[in-house]
């Protein structure tokens, strides 16, 4: 004698739903425990408005740092600004020494605009909080060692 599977067994739907939620929760916990391997997360601070873009250039050598972004940067990310916040995420970066330059390109012309006296009109910042006094800092002043693992960094813009 064949017994049919109960289609409306009391509590079966609740049990299935509970199991599905537990499975989702278990997967989200596992996913949260796995770090983003080989990623640099750069949060940009002190953005004065939502106009334009934030451009993040990652250099792996002193050549062209920080001016020749298109020619010499290892990676370049251009991010829209939302609520005066931006974050640049560089993924699959091998271990090594790097330096970052960040630009708030308010007029989206792809360069840092300066006044006739040479003072920047747009926001800029460097890794290691390297200072720009009478010119841009050197690669060595802005450089940092990246071990190839997950890295969270903050760069504050200066105007």
Image: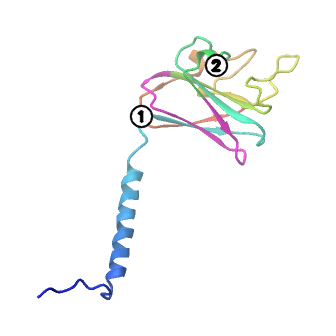
Left or right of 19, for residue 46: right
Q: Is residue 93 magenta?
A: yes
Q: Quadrant of the C terminus?
A: top right
Q: Position of residue 16 (x, y in %)?
A: 34, 75
Tell me the SS state at disc 1: loop
| Position above or below: 58 against 84 | above
Q: Residue furthest left?
A: 1
* Residue matched to label 2: 70
Q: Quadrant of the N terminus?
A: bottom left
User: Looking at the rendering, which quadrant does residue 114 occupy?
Assistant: top right
Tell me the SS state at disc 2: helix
Give 111 or 126, whichever is nearer the viewer: 111
Q: Position of residue 11 (x, y in %)?
A: 33, 85
Colouring scheme, one of rainbow, by chain, secondary structure, one colour:
rainbow
Q: Position of residue 104 (x, y in %)?
A: 73, 32
* Boundaries of the magenta span: 77-97
* Residue matched to label 1: 149
Left or right of 3, for residue 129: right
Q: Tell me the residue at 36%/80% (across/down).
A: 14
Quote the CA–CA distance across marks 2 and 1: 26 Å
Q: Tell me the residue at 80%/23% (across/down).
A: 113
Rate crowding at label 1 as few (under 14), some (14 to 19) or many (20 or more) other CA atoms within 10 Å: some
């Amino acid at each position: 004698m064949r017994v049919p599977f109960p289609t409306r067994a009391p509590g079966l739907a609740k049990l299935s739903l509970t199991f599905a939620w537990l499975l989702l929760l278990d997967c989200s916990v596992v996913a949260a425990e796995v770090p983003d391997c080989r990623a640099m997360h750069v949060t940009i601070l002190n953005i004065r408005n939502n106009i334009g873009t934030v451009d993040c250039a990652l250099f792996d050598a002193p050549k062209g740092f920080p001016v020749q972004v298109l020619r010499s940067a290892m990676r370049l990310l251009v991010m829209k600004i939302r609520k005066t916040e931006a974050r640049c995420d560089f993924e699959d970066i091998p271990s090594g020494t790097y330096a970052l330059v960040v630009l708030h390109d308010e007029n989206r012309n792809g360069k840092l605009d300066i006044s006739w006296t040479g003072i920047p009109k747009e926001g800029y910042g460097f890794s290691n909080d390297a200072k720009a006094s009478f010119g841009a800092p050197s690669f060595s002043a802005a450089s940092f060692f990246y071990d190839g693992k997950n890295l969270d960094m903050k760069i504050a813009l200066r105007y």
